[in-house]
Amino acid sequence: MKFFVDTADVAEIKELAALGLLDGVTTNPSLVAKAGRDFKGLIAEICEIVPGPVSAEVAATDYEGMLSEGRILAKIAKNVTVKVPLTWDGLKACRALTGDGTMVNVTLCFSANQALLAAKAGATFISPFVGRLDDISLDGSDLLREIRVIYDNYDDLTTQILAASLRTVNHVKEAALIGADVGTVPPGVLKALVKHPLTDKGLEMFLADWKKTGQKIA
Ligand code: E4P
């Protein structure tokens, strides 16, 4: 599973990119508002740091508006992935932008049928929101499972499943077990993946025993 980081915080992106952990970045209007920076400048900077797909979301909701904004965003860098919402106009914009040769991420997906439509519209990525389904007491992982089965049933559906709204380490594990192509993860969750109490305890014991040997590796 590829890892995208779900943030517009350049410092966090730089840190994770330096670890060689990042295959891409996703942003959304809420994350951009949090960053408090000029949108196009921010996306240009992120695209320089991470060579993989960088999602930048349109703000318009009508087809013409989305197409025009999408084309402006696509000009920023080759790795910009234009994010459009899962509406009829969004699907139309997806088809047109894909026709331009631009990568498109269809976002706010909450049903398998929506994912099927996005794939038919030529989306590069579909973003099912796992955590937000969990928020309303549904199982977001079920949606990932359904989309995986449907896409695998048809060779002509080449859209990649980008598991989004992953808020816990278990969400990440579930997405990988189900076979999502990509998981987009907030920096805190990505960093938490390395943690296990037995790793910490084991390391502590090994270090204590190593001290007893009185040796140095030099
Ligand atoms: C990413 O593309 C999505 O916008 C993001 O994962 C949504 O996450 P949230 O539901 O935690 O806001």
Image (cartoon, helix red, strand yellow):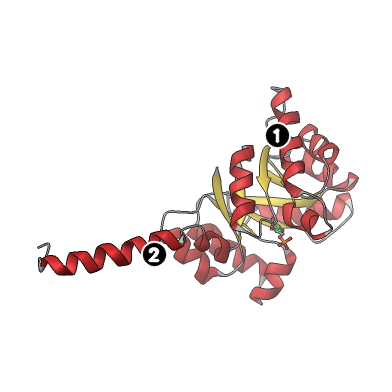
Of 91 and 108, the residue lying toward us: 108
Query: Is residue 43 visible from the viewing direction of this image?
Result: yes
Which tag, 2 or 1, sits closer to the chain's start?
1
Of 135 and 101, the residue lying toward us: 135
Q: How many marks?
A: 2
Above or below, 84 against 198 in this view is above
Image mark for residue 170? none
Tell me the quadrant of ligand 1.
Answer: bottom right
Of 132 and 106, the residue lying toward us: 132
Residue position marked by numbered label 1 in the rendering: 148
Residue 176 placement (x, y as % from top left)? 59, 43
Q: Amino acid at mark 1?
A: Arg
Q: Amino acid at mark 2?
A: Asp
State the residue lying farthest toward the bottom: 36
- Give the residue drawn at x 57%, y 62%: 189
- Give the residue drawn at x 47%, y 65%: 14
Above or below, 127 against 14 in this view is above
- Give the residue drawn at x 39%, y 59%: 199
Q: Mark 2, mark 1: which one is toward the viewer?
A: 2
Q: CA distance from mark 2 to mark 1?
A: 36 Å
Residue position marked by numbered label 2 in the rendering: 200
- Give the residue drawn at x 77%, y 56%: 134
Residue 35 placement (x, y as % from top left)? 64, 74
Give the left or right position of residue 215, taking residue 85 as reference.
Answer: left
- For label 2, the SS is helix
